[in-house]
Image: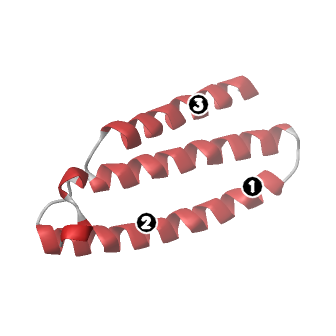
Amino acid sequence: MVPLSAYVILSAILFTIGTVGVLIRRNLIILLLSIELMFNAANINFVAFSHYFQDVAGQVFVVFVLTIAAAEVAVGLAIVIALYRGRATVNVEEFNLMKW
């Protein structure tokens, strides 16, 4: 049996990687992937604690988080495609929508 601390450590590592990806990278697609990684790190915590406390509330919450993540991906990719068509780049530093 895997202890709860292993899941928490794994989740913390994944969340840290996602946070570093959001703060360092300037590619919109990488930013979206880093946010998804942070969502999944939170989901690991929800499921681990749900199993540890023998309660399904955490697993139900994961379904809602996955639904929000799917909507975020759909809207985010639509925005990325629209910006790419206008500027032919996905680099965040080259976008200044006020001067378009």
Along the viewing direction, whichever of 38 and 24 lies nearer the viewer: 24
Quadrant in the rendering for residue 45:
top right
Q: Which residue is mark 1?
A: 59
Instruction: Tell me the amino acid under the disc marked 1.
Output: Gln
Q: Which residue is mark 3?
A: 12
Q: Which residue is mark 2?
A: 73
| Mark 2 / mark 3, whichever is N-terminal | 3
Q: Is residue 2 left or right of residue 90?
A: right
Q: Residues within 10 Å of mark 1 (few under 14, many from 20)?
A: some
- Residue 93 in percent (x, y) is at 22, 51
- Residue 37 in percent (x, y) is at 48, 46
User: Disc 3 versus disc 1: distance between alpha carbons?
Assistant: 19 Å
Name the front one of labels 3 and 1: 3
- Residue 36 in percent (x, y) is at 47, 52
Name the front one of labels 2 and 1: 2
User: Disc 2 versus disc 1: distance between alpha carbons?
Assistant: 21 Å
Name which residue lies at 31% across and 49% down: 30
User: Disc 2 versus disc 3: distance between alpha carbons?
Assistant: 22 Å
Quadrant in the rendering for residue 11:
top right
Along the viewing direction, whichever of 73 and 52 lies nearer the viewer: 73
Q: Is residue 47 left or right of residue 56?
A: left
| Circles 2 and 3 in contact, beta carbons < 8 Å | no
Name which residue lies at 53% across and 62% down: 69
| Mark 2 / mark 1, whichever is N-terminal | 1
Judged from the image, the secondary structure of the residue bearing numbered disc 2 is: helix
Instruction: Tell me the amino acid under the disc marked 3.
Output: Ala
Tell me the tag on residue 14.
none
Image quadrant where one finds the N terminus: top right
